Amino acid sequence: MYAYDVGGSPSYESGLQTLQANKERGANVMVIEKKMIYRASLSLIVENPDSTNVYIEKVAEKYKGYVNKIGTDQTIIRVKSGNLDAAVKDISELGKVERKTKTGEDVTEDYLDFKIRLENAEMARKRYLELLKKAENVETALKVEKELERLNETIDLIKGKMNRINNLAEYSTIVINLKEKKKPGIIGYIGIGLYHSVKWLFVRN
């Protein structure tokens, strides 16, 4: 977990070291859980992309997730982050894996920054609401209301960004690139038939 002074700059190491000291001196301390965003990508060679997508949808459902995009070339699903490795393993068994990657991004400091800005904006809104009650004329009231409108927009924007981070941290994204296995043409099938015939002759001899 991270710990920071609200008025200070985010620092992972110093936050952990000074958490107890901050509590003892009564400072305004903010503690949040680490926020990680994980993504995985697979390239699969499959017999039939449409049939494979049916199974991919079942994998998403199995691991408490959902389908974000489905297509014959590329399908994207999201699963609970704790189930990412298991979901990737299941999908890998649906075809021949050409390529597989997994990445992780630590967005804890970004989230903390938004949280601090949100608290500051909410405190400012509270002060302006108090000023609105004390406004002595219409002109002053209109100025305060205009500032309140701006603060409300800022608060909604920050909340939206925080919700997005929470969602990305809760559900990991899996991108599956699908490639249909090439089937041999007529000449190819003849070649395969000849191969098996010759092989059979050698076996008999």
Image (cartoon, rainbow, N blue to C red):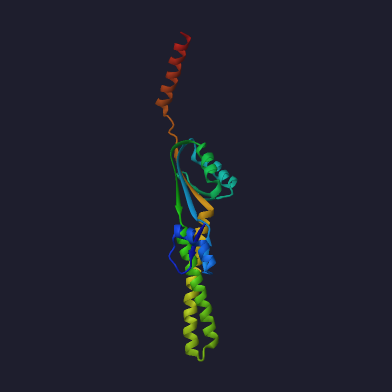
Looking at the image, is 39 positioned above or below residue 89?
A: below
Q: Nearer the viewer, residue 75 or 143?
A: 143
- Is residue 19 shown above or below 187? below
Depth check: 182 or 165 in front? Answer: 165
Q: Position of residue 72 (x, y in %)?
A: 47, 44
Q: Is residue 128 visible?
A: yes
Q: Is residue 61 left or right of residue 162?
A: right
Give the x, y percent position of residue 133. 55, 86
Q: Is residue 88 above or below residue 120?
A: above
The residue at 41%/22% (across/down) is: 191
Furthest residue in direction bottom, as rendered: 137
Say if residue 51 shows up in the picture.
no
Which residue is at the front of the view, 66 or 74? 66
Look at 52% across and 39% down and name the residue there. Answer: 89
| Residue pictured at 49% horizontal, 53% vertical | 36
Residue in view at x 47 percent, y 79 percent: 147
Is 158 rendered above or below residue 186? below
Q: Position of residue 49 (x, y in %)?
A: 49, 40
- Residue 97, x across and y down, in percent: 45, 37
How many marks the image carries: the answer is 0
